[in-house]
Amino acid sequence: MNTTPQAEILNIGDELLIGQIVNTNAVWLAQELNKRGVAVQRMTTVGDREMDIVAALTHAMQHQDIIIITGGLGPTKDDLTKDILTRFFNTRLVFHEEVFQLLDSFFKKRGRVLNEANKTQCYVPEACTVLMNYWGTAPGMLFEKEGKIIVSLPGVPLEMKELMNKYIFPLIESRYTLPPLIHRSFLTEGIPESELMTILADWENNLPPSIKLAYLPSAGQVTLRLSTLNTDGKGKELILEQEEKLKAIIGHEIVGYDGETLEQVIQRIFIENKLTLGTAESCTGGYIAHKITSVPGSSAYFMGSVVSYHNRVKQEILQVKNETLQTVGAVSKETVIQMAENARKMLHTDYTIAVSGIAGPDGGTPEKPVGTVWVAWATPQGTLTKKYRFGNDRLTNIHRTYQAALGVLRKLVLNIPVGENFWE
Amino acid sequence: MNTTPQAEILNIGDELLIGQIVNTNAVWLAQELNKRGVAVQRMTTVGDREMDIVAALTHAMQHQDIIIITGGLGPTKDDLTKDILTRFFNTRLVFHEEVFQLLDSFFKKRGRVLNEANKTQCYVPEACTVLMNYWGTAPGMLFEKEGKIIVSLPGVPLEMKELMNKYIFPLIESRYTLPPLIHRSFLTEGIPESELMTILADWENNLPPSIKLAYLPSAGQVTLRLSTLNTDGKGKELILEQEEKLKAIIGHEIVGYDGETLEQVIQRIFIENKLTLGTAESCTGGYIAHKITSVPGSSAYFMGSVVSYHNRVKQEILQVKNETLQTVGAVSKETVIQMAENARKMLHTDYTIAVSGIAGPDGGTPEKPVGTVWVAWATPQGTLTKKYRFGNDRLTNIHRTYQAALGVLRKLVLNIPVGENFWE
């Protein structure tokens, strides 16, 4: 493990501390560094204040091998990073002819003239290696001290990425013999995290010490991730071995691999099997159709949807019987069956999902509290239904309904048992 | 300014350090803390390792008044935070009957049984105030030491937000006399940031020095925010004065105030005017209906939608003429007019939006490149159309279509001129 360099991502900018922008730079850097076997130990965000920047930098110098600093390099006066780095590394600012030429041509191309603020960008710390920035105005800076790599880059995502790709990743790769870190992740659907832990306890306790397991839960889904350092070239094999064991335990519940989403998996399965899909949605209001059609290529299998928000639309377009709505109501087994079966005919699909429920926060009754959702799946083999009882939050209920509807749909198409009480 | 409490947001989780998830918790916390006059000094992200968590916590205790810790509280064994906090604050874990009761009823409601992993969640540090979590399984923890507030919350965004709103923001507000920072924000739609800056330059240059203006752009929309410290009780008046001036310049383009979304504004206007709405969607695949129905109470005016993804659905359900589809195609003025007008009749609405376009990445032609979108608005006064040319990114195109469709709809209902070339 000693060969794994440790890194810190240090982001500078008041706009991050007031929540004005999302720190997508840190996410990209973390992904790219990890991919190359660099372990990101810490991410720190501080504002445009010298004391805070110096404190963060001092701490990082004590603990890390690689420090990537982004932000605080523009021409405006609240961008202090360059001056601070100059003092921090006991050096001085010098005029850099090559930077000036590049900047001058950059402005000329755009029909603009260099102003005084821009000219300050041509001064760089004498002790640094200048990283020529062909995508913007502020040059990047590379410092090397005590065997450590310290890089300062502009905060503009495009410029930051280009400079990392052109100068820093090659440098890191030449400097370190990196043991490639291998990941394999498994998306599971419908099993709560705690239950999954119980089911997988034996397997987890018997994992080889070189393999790390992580549970990554998000509303209604848990992703399992196996990681190992591929030190002897056998990492892939090692992970595959555990993947087989995992599949023997919860194979049916593994929906997708390595970041696939539920709707991507559904699309793959439907297209592979030359099947078509449609939805009839009440409480989800088009969300299921939206998730499905957010995937490029979905028009190859998704026909469309009727969003019957008002009962009149359920009756007139989806032909749900007035009697049904009057007696058992819109949130009922009978209604979703009629919605699914009629929509399946109208949309000419192999499978159609119908949902009707009470998303909340209002509209609940003692018999049908907020979070009650009926789902029907009309299939070539007949229609199945299930009643769910989600929680009180509207958007969560909508999201959980989509997950449940597509999760069960996957099993139906793949002939995986869905459990009892589904068939009417 | 000495009364301004300083805060650090400390996020725990290996998944953040490998770039697997975007840290939206930090963004929300930063916004909400700043809104209340708390200055966020630093955001730190560390992994699930005791040494790193303790180091970050120690540093934060030395420098901050308020420390908000998120993540690392689930039932799985890689969630270490609770144990570490117990040691850090020299206390011990004790069984908490109330947490157990809540967890037990949480599970019973869902027809599940508490397992051993969940039972560990009922043990909490003796020295903390337990924050009862009604939205999930892991309780929050509040420590108070040396006059500082240290809070540990689950990383699930919904649970984190509810716990902050219920317990921590009220505590902070009662503990500190915060300098009342007043904000007023204006959502604008359809004017690019650089154009807006030009239009507003004179006004901006004449703002009183005590008022700060921020441009907060997001895809297709720009929010303008005015802020002032209400030190002498005249802040509101001062801002109102500038609001009037702003309205005189771009009044028609101000969609909403103080965080209102486009769909919230549409709902308010439609319900106030006792009007109804429906959509007929092709390339947006239900996204517009979804955004509309994500607002509680939308069933009071939104009737439903026909998502006619496949041309057969356009023909058979929406009665678009076969001839139209054959000659000018699905992405055409004629098609969206028929979609909008027929859907308006079928859904019995006052207004209906229809959209058809090429979301991408595939499906473009030289005449209709990716990003081409036709929108029609069927209104009581007749039907309007407009052709848009967005970019190459699928999800952005879908999002921009929704913004444009609802942005124009607002103007139509409010009798604001929409510009030329809209009426057929």
Image (cartoon, coloured by chain):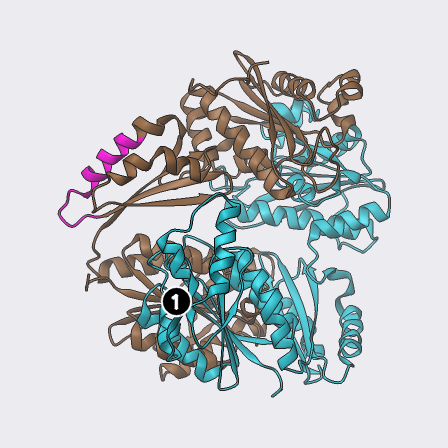
Chain colours: A cyan, B brown
Total numbered circles:
1
Confirm whether residue B193 shows in the render: yes
What is the magenta range? B229-246
Does the magenta segment cover residue A170?
no
Residue A263 locus on image (x, y percent): 70, 49
**A388 with respect to B70 (left or right):** right
For disc 1, the chain is A
Confirm whether residue B126 shows in the render: no
Does the magenta segment cover residue B240?
yes
Magenta residues: mostly which secondary structure? helix
Q: Which residue is mark 1?
A: A81
Residue A201 locus on image (x, y percent): 67, 76
**On the rendered image, what quadrant is the N terminus of chain B found in?**
bottom left
**B165 with respect to B208 (left or right):** right
Residue A209 locus on image (x, y percent): 68, 85
| The image quarter in which residue B183 lies | top left
Nearer the observer, A332 or A415? A415
Question: For the point 77% across and 81% down, which residue is it?
Answer: A233
Nearer the observer, B403 or A38? A38
Q: Residues within 10 Å of mark 1 (few under 14, many from 20)?
A: many
Residue B168 locus on image (x, y percent): 33, 61
Q: Secondary structure at mark 1?
A: helix
Q: Amino acid at mark 1?
A: Thr
**B102 with respect to B8 (left or right):** right
